[in-house]
């Protein structure tokens, strides 16, 4: 673990990232920096995110449950004791949360400060478009959501690199699975083609649209939690080798996650009753 002040004290001139400095409490509300979020426990981050949705996003003309899938990720981190302060996983996660927080502040008109996080502007745009009814179509919504999280994620990668914190092999493999999630949200037609391929189980091919809709639903923690559990198990064992194509990893996800989908949506029960 590195000292508490490392992120905050890293020179802000490091290119291409302006590393945020710890701000005074006067920057509140919605003023936690990456440095502060990184040093929160996962339990506190979960409370923080839930509060952000219920107390702040709810003030916008939108369904405030925009990040319940991220709640699922944090619940998994909590249960598996991952993303400990100072780790690479923690820094990237903190950047994602900072982007959400600042994007909400921007959308509410509370501040114009992005804290140097590109995800802030993307999330603000997402929330405004959502409020204006521009994201009613699921595929359009998911692409906008994914772009915002991707921007904040890449900022976190750059921050970690700037201060010399590298991922473990398992963390990096786990990250590839998270990339697949965002990729699927931005590329629904290609993802559906992959799920309909000849090597995919016929039952999955038949239900690929509802499965993908379930898998990428941001308003529930269940798919994200179960996806994380499966991805972390694979990442620790490294069974995927060096094959990190989005389509290949999506197909690798399928058997276990599809069973979770059937159970969570009641389709397994329905089929048993039919027989």
Image (cartoon, helix red, strand yellow):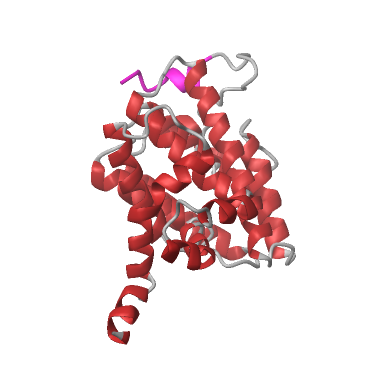
Q: Residue furthest bottom?
A: 274
| Residue 271 in sight from this viewpoint | yes
Name the residue rendered at 50%, 59% in the picture.
53
Residue 20 lies, with reference to residue 79, above or below; the image says above
Residue 2 lies, with reference to residue 28, above or below; the image says above
Position of residue 218 in the picture relative to residue 266 (left or right): right
Name the residue rendered at 58%, 39% in the picture.
150
* 254 magenta-colored: no
| Residue 97 in sight from this viewpoint | no
Pick whichever, 273 or 153, lies toward us: 273
Viewport quadrant of the C terminus? bottom left
Please tell me whether the stretch drawn in magenta is mainly helix, strand or loop. loop
Viewport quadrant of the N terminus? top left
Q: Report how many numbered discs are placed on residues in the image.
A: 0
Pick whichever, 156 or 98, lies toward us: 156
Image spot of residue 198 (x, y percent): 50, 53
The answer to which quarter of the image holds residue 39 is: top left
Residue 15 lies, with reference to residue 59, above or below; the image says above
Q: Residue furthest front?
A: 198
Pick whichever, 201 or 160, lies toward us: 201
Image spot of residue 24 (x, y percent): 52, 33
Which region of the structure is painted magenta?
A: 1-10
Image spot of residue 145 (x, y percent): 61, 51
Image spot of residue 25 (x, y percent): 50, 38
């Amino acid at each position: 673990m590195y000292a508490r002040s490392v992120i905050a004290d890293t020179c802000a001139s490091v290119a291409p990232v302006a590393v945020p400095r710890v701000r005074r409490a006067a920057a509140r509300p919605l003023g936690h920096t990456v440095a502060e979020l990184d040093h929160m426990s996962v339990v506190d981050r979960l409370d923080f995110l839930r509060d952000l949705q219920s107390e702040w996003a709810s003030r916008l003309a939108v369904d405030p449950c925009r990040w319940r899938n991220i709640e699922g990720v944090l619940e998994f981190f909590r249960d598996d004791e991952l993303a400990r302060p100072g780790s690479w996983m923690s820094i990237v996660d903190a950047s994602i949360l900072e982007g959400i927080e600042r994007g909400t502040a921007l959308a509410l008109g509370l501040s114009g400060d992005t804290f140097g996080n590109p995800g802030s502007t993307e999330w603000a745009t997402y929330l405004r478009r959502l409020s204006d009814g521009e994201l009613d179509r699921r595929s359009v919504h998911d692409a906008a959501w994914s772009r915002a999280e991707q921007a904040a994620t890449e900022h976190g990668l750059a921050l970690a690199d700037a201060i010399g914190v590298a991922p473990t092999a398992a963390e990096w493999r786990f990250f590839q699975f998270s990339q697949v999630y965002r990729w699927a949200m931005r590329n629904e037609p290609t993802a559906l083609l992959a799920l309909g391929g000849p090597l995919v189980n016929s039952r999955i091919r038949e239900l690929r649209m509802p499965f993908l809709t379930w898998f990428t639903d941001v308003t529930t923690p269940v798919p994200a939690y179960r996806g994380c559990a499966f991805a972390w198990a694979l990442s620790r064992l490294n069974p995927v080798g060096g094959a990190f194509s989005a389509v290949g990893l999506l197909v690798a996800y399928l058997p276990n996650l599809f069973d979770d989908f059937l159970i969570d949506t009641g389709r397994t029960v329905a089929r048993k009753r039919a027989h």
